[in-house]
Image (cartoon, rainbow, N blue to C red):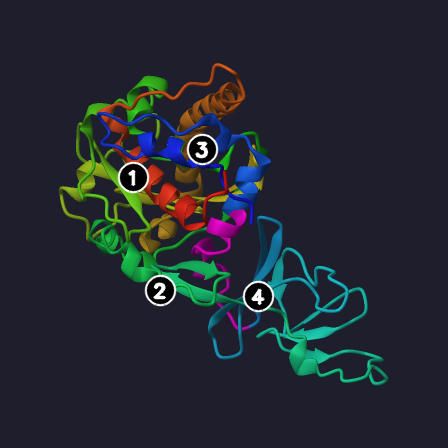
Amino acid sequence: MTTLSDGLMAALDASIEDVSKASTLPAELYTSADVLALETEAIFMKEWLCVGRAERIPNVGDWFTVTIVDEPLIIARNKAGDVCAMSAVCQHRAMQVCEGEGNSTTFKCPYHHWNYGLDGRLLGAPAMERTEAFNKADFGLPQLRVEEWLGFVFVNFDQDASPLAPTLERYSPFVHNYDLENAVCPGTFTLEGMPWNWKVMFENFNDGYHANRLHEYVQDFCPSNLSDFPVPWSDDSNVIFRTGGYTHIDGGFNATHRVIMEVFPDLTEEERTRSTFALMPPTLCFGTAPDQCFFFLIRPTGPETIDVEIGYIFHPSALDDPLFDQKMALSDAGVQVFVDQDQDATTKVQRGLRSRFAPRGRYSWQEESHIQFNRWLVQRYRASGVAAP
């Protein structure tokens, strides 16, 4: 496995200090193909990866595909009604057996018609009767671990991985009243080839420091100085989050600064005066507001490029509103203002990280989430081993 050099590993110490003392991560971590190769094995092949909402495949035989660090996967609802995940790579000649989404009883590879069940078992392999010692049971699609959390589907390449849910408990009280298992995501859309590193995306999503600076006219109702980091970081946690306080109840990320959709009915008054912004690395950025939740699924396509799948989640009553589509358009128009600003900023940050003058900057107290993310990241870099001098 690719490893970080001793010098680079030692340099990470400065990024996990108290926020008042810490320096930003070395720029090389955001630009190097070798670092992404390390992260692929040490992080993406070992951590729980969010691939979407379970409601996307409600019926037996429903499936969709997703590719994460060059690994094409099938996420399916099997005959027992359970969500399962498997490689989409045919175990004959490595062709991808399906793309997109659909409903079927089997997966047939278009190349030579090897046929697989919804559980990945090889059901049929034409003209293999003369192949010595060929046993269909040995050639099923490789399986991944699956765990559902609040309606999200997570998969893990590591069959020995510890359960996910206990590592997210520090965030659970902040989302309990949203009843996310029964909430509704009308659909998602994907931005492809975004020109920045996956860690730049995570940092920007949970950066309270820029909230009413870069987004001055959109996010004045949720100013940077109302950022809070309510639960101390713990080494066994897989969620990093902060709250963003509002200047008034029922704030909204749109031009009115107020909710547009039906407010989640079980929220407390306190919960209606804040958002939460959570990272569940390495693939999920998740946020809450009184009338909607939002998520970004991050998939690296190179050391400096990602695809981003974006979705919104609502209380079911919101979709009963005959004006839902019109309200959604208004909400999305407001969101797009600061999405455009974020895209411009992260593109230019990535460009700056390639400069010989890229800094080891210092953090504001409003960037405490970055320190927590650094600690999560450095744990995994160190567990991967250190190169010999």
Which amino acid, by three-letter code, is at mark 3?
A: Leu
Task: Please name the residue that numbered disc 2 is placed on.
Answer: 163
Residue at 15% in and 47% down: 268
Point out the frontmost of discs 1 and 3.
Answer: 3
User: Quick one: 168 or 183, which is closer to the camera?
Assistant: 168
Residue at 32% in and 18% down: 213
Which amino acid, by three-letter code, is at mark 1?
A: Gln
Point out the frontmost of discs 3 and 2.
Answer: 3
Q: Earlier in the sequence, mark 1 or mark 2?
A: 2
Residue 225 seen by the camera: yes
- Magenta run includes residue 378: no
Label 2 Cα neighbours within 10 Å, binned few <14 / some 14-19 / many ≥20? few
Task: Please name the residue that numbered disc 4 is placed on.
Answer: 86
- Which numbered disc covers residue 372? 1
Task: Please name the residue that numbered disc 3 is placed on.
Answer: 8
Residue 164 picture location, percent across and down: 35, 60
Quadrant of the image occupied by residue 259 = top left
Residue at 66% in and 79% down: 138
Q: What are the residue bounds of the magenta stretch? A: 40-60
State the CA–CA distance, disc 3 to disc 4. 35 Å
Label 3 Cα neighbours within 10 Å, binned few <14 / some 14-19 / many ≥20? some
Which amino acid, by three-letter code, is at mark 2?
A: Pro
Which amino acid, by three-letter code, is at mark 4?
A: Met
